[in-house]
Image (spheres, rainbow, N blue to C red):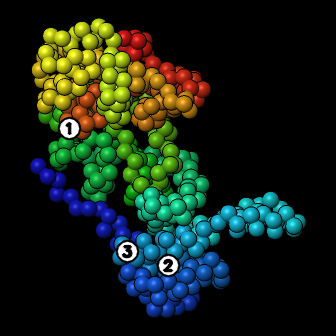
Amino acid sequence: MALPFSNTVPRTIERLRNAFVETARGAREVAGLPLRPDLPDDDIPRLKGRIDACLEGKGGETARRGRAAELGQAYLSLSPAGRKKFLLTLAHGYGLPREAAAAAVERWRAGKEPPRALVRALEPPAVRLLREFVGVPQGVKFVVDLRAELLTLGKSDAAARALSEDLRPLLSAWFDVGFLDLVRIDWKASAALLEKLVDYEAVHAIRSWRDLKNRLDSDRRCFAFFHPRMPDEPLIFVEVALVDGMAGNVQRLLDARAETHDPKDANTAIFYSISNCQQGLAGISFGNFLIKRVAEQLARDLPNIKDFATLSPIPGLRQHVDGRLKNEGDDALTQGEIASLVPVTNQAAGAAAVRQLLDRPTWWEVPAINKALRPILSRLAARYLTTTDEKGRALDRVAHFHLGNGAVVERLNWLADTSANGLKQSYAMMVNYRYKLGDVDANHEAYATGKIVASREVRALAKG
C-alpha cells in the first residue's frame, strides 16, 4: 500500500517565498527589475548590486530585513540552474580568500582596535550577509536549505565547499542544544508533520499508514528536536520501542500486525531509528543530546524502564568483510573456520568458499550454510566493531556515533534485518548499543582516548 503523501519540498519553498514577500514589502527602496530564472550573465551585476546593498546595511532594522527578504525571494524565484549561479557568485565573490584575510590581519596589527574587531574583519561577507536572515520570518530555514545546496555544490567547487564550512559556526550557534525543544510526536500530530516523518525516515522506510500508526502506538515513542525559529520542521527524530528484554530482530520489532503491549509491562527502551531531517545541518551534532534527553524523559515517565539500548545497523560491515576476504584470503579465517566449511561446499575452500556461499541467493535460508557462516561473520563483525582506526575512532560510522555518546557494544544479532538494505549493509546483522545511564560519561571519556567499551560476549566473539 503506497502512502498518499506528496513531496514536502515544493510546499516548503512556497512557504519561504510567501514569508519573504511579506517582509520585503517593508523595504524602503525598490529592488529594480526581477532577476531572470536562469540568471544569465548580464543579470549578475544586478545581483551583486543587491548583495552589496544588503552588506552596506543602510537604514534601520526594517530596511535591512526587507532587503534580505527581497534577496531571498529573488533566490527562490530562480530555476535550479539560476540558483547554482547565484550560489557560485556568492561563494566566489563574497568569501574571504587567504590574501584578503592576511591583509585584514596586517591592517589590524597596524591599528589599535581590540581583538573583536579582527574577528569581525575575518568573517566572510557572505556569512555576514546570511546572518541578516535570522530576523526574517522563515529566514533560519532558508539559510539551512541554502547550506544544503552549498554542500552539494562543494563536491565539485572549492569556494562553495569553503562557504559551507564558513557557515557551520554560525549554524552551530543558532542551533545550540540549549535552544532546542524536545517534543513527543504521536498519532494526533498534524498531517503535515506526520508526512515529514515519512519523508525524513532514513533507516527503516515507512511503507504504509498502518506502519506509521504502529510506530506511534502506545508501546512506541517518537521524539524530535525542534528549533523555535523552525517550529514546523523537525531537526532530528528518534523512534523507540518499549519492549520486554533486548530486541534482536528489526522485522519483528516493526511488524504492524503484532499485538500492542502495555508500556507499563516493558523493561527496555529500544532506540531503533535515528533520522537527521535537515541536510543543511550536516556536521552540527545534536543526536547525542537527543538520545540522552529521551532516555531521561522515559525514565521519568516510565519508572519500569530499566535498560536503554539501540537496535542499530552496521552500515560498513559488508564492505569490510568483502574487503578482508578479497585482500587477505584464507588469512582472514581461522583454521577451525576453514575446516567447518568443508561439509557445505565441495567446489571451493577457505575464503573462496565463504565468497561462494555469500553470493548464493537467499543463502541464509539454507540451514547448513547458515550454521557454517554464522560463527565466521559474527567473529569478523565483532572484530570490526571493537577495532579503531589510526585516529582512535571506531571503523563504523554508527558505532562512532553511539560510542562517542557513551554507549557500550552490547550484543550482535544474527539475521536481524533480512531486508534488501540489511543484506546490502551488513549481511543482515545488527548490533545493540547499550546506554547505562550511570556509566555514559565514563564510557565517553574512555572512547575519547581510543578505547572501545564492549560486553564480554562481544569481546569473546572478537577473539574467536
**Residue 300 lies in quadrant:** top left
**Please, what is the three-letter code of the amino acid marked with disc 1?**
Ala
Residue 216 seen in the figure: yes
Horizontal side, residue 46 vs residue 61: left or right: left
In the foreground, 40 or 267: 40
Estimate how packed mark 1 is, as few (under 14), some (14 to 19) or many (20 or more) residues with alpha carbons within 10 Å. Answer: few
In the foreground, 369 or 21: 369
**Please, what is the three-letter code of the amino acid marked with disc 2?**
Leu
Q: Secondary structure at mark 2?
A: helix
Label 3 to label 2: alpha-carbon separation: 17 Å
Find residue 206 and report its horizontal and vertical position in percent. 23, 45
Labels 1 and 3: the sequence-earlier one = 3
Horizontal side, residue 349 vs residue 383: left or right: left
Horizontal side, residue 183 vs residue 71: left or right: left
Q: Which residue is mark 1?
A: 420
**Please, what is the three-letter code of the amino acid marked with disc 3?**
Ala
Q: Is residue 379 above or below residue 165?
A: above
Q: Which residue is mark 2?
A: 71
In the foreground, 144 or 383: 383
Labels 2 and 1: the sequence-earlier one = 2
- Residue 198 is marked as none
Horizontal side, residue 12 vs residue 125: left or right: left
Q: Secondary structure at mark 1?
A: helix
Q: Which residue is mark 3?
A: 81
Whether tag 1 and tag 3 are in contact, CB under 8 A, the answer is: no
Estimate how packed mark 2 is, as few (under 14), some (14 to 19) or many (20 or more) residues with alpha carbons within 10 Å. Answer: some
Label 1 to label 3: alpha-carbon separation: 35 Å
In the foreground, 361 or 171: 361
Find residue 251 and report its horizontal and vertical position in percent. 20, 31
Find residue 52 and report its horizontal and vertical position in percent. 60, 81
Q: Secondary structure at mark 3?
A: helix
Label 2 to label 1: alpha-carbon separation: 45 Å
